[in-house]
Image (spheres, helix red, strand yellow):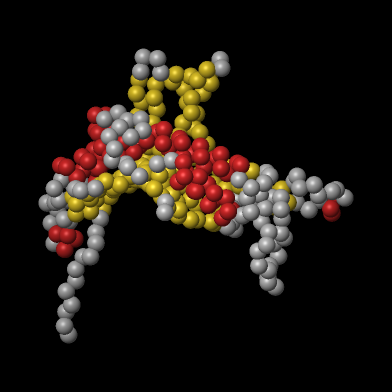
Amino acid sequence: MTVTPVTITANSYGKSEVRLVTVRRGPDRHELKDVTVAIRLEGDFAAAYTQGDNTGVVATDTMKNTVYALAAEHPFDDVEDFGLALTAHLTKIYPQVSSARVELTEHLWERIEAAGNPHPHAFRRAGSERRTAVVTRDHDTVHVLAGLEDLVVMKTAKSAFEGFPRDRWTTLKETGDRLLATALRATWRYSRPDVPGIPFGRLWSDVRRVLLETFAEHDSRSVQHTLYAMGEAVLETLDVEEIHLAMPNRHHLPVDLTPFGQENRNEIFVATTEPYGLIEATLRRG
């Protein structure tokens, strides 16, 4: 029997779910950041797999400690900036690392209002929405993906779903007036992420604003129709090269009130969580 050589075609490893909370204590107000970090390294680690040789393996515990130490040395306003600093550090001090990928999820907090003003050091969680960033760096290039997750939105007018094909198993009724709700997930790639001093926070807020404004104003013929309009608006107005949108349809079904002797006025609905439609697309300039 001929023994076929076994080779490793790809490998990576890292540290996930590193929880980082920072408080920058200014004289008049505090700035709070709450982030979950995941690190993945690629490089010359084959000997660890094939021979049990750990001389080139950066301990994942060291990666965790690096997150905390670097956050202390490099205070940040935007998770993209911290991702850039972290990937630069990892690829610079470890020559065996060919590329570093850092995923950051920011759990958003809002200031509590007291006496009509934002409180300087008291906060509340801003619902389920999260801000995300993925920074990938090798020795020649760097890529930044920004995004948001679980932004729950609903519109109660200017939404329809009609003209779809019907067969013997189709029971869904056509409607020109329905509720449209989703928990939006979006990721986008900036055209020039390596420009020094790029205002990631302002850009993120601008993308979020355009997405929300377009969702609210668009005369929707379907979730697909509105998804395209939202992505198109971002690409046409902001310095974004590509955007991916995922919009699970959070169904709100009209309740039939006729068994109770009441009129159906399209005002009473039941919210359902499963099953649900999931609509996704990637839009790119050009």
Q: Is residue 78 above or below residue 63?
A: above
Give the side of residue 159 with respect to residue 144, left or right: right
Whole-percent x, y for residue 128 in the image: 51, 40
Res. 236 visible in picture: yes
Res. 18 visible in picture: no
Residue at the image position 80 percent from the left and 47 percent from the top: 265
Residue at the image position 21 percent from the left and 43 percent from the top: 90
Question: Of residues 244 and 40, which is closer to you in this image?
Answer: 244
Give the side of residue 75 with respect to residue 30, left or right: left
Q: To which quarter of the image does residue 2 belong?
A: bottom left
Question: Of residues 107 and 157, which is closer to you in this image?
Answer: 157
Question: Of residues 27 and 16, which is closer to you in this image?
Answer: 27
Q: Is residue 15 above or below residue 44?
A: above
Q: Is residue 110 above or below residue 242?
A: above
Q: Is residue 210 above or below residue 43?
A: above
Q: To which quarter of the image does residue 192 belong?
A: top left
| Total marks in image | 0
Indicate the quadrant containing the N terminus: top left, top right, bottom left or bottom right.
bottom left
Residue at the image position 45 percent from the left and 46 percent from the top: 235
Residue at the image position 52 percent from the left and 47 percent from the top: 230
Q: Residue furthest front?
A: 286
Whole-percent x, y for residue 18 in the image: 33, 41
Whole-percent x, y for residue 113 in the image: 53, 21
Whole-percent x, y for residue 176 in the image: 71, 53
Give the side of residue 257 with respect to residue 203, left or right: right
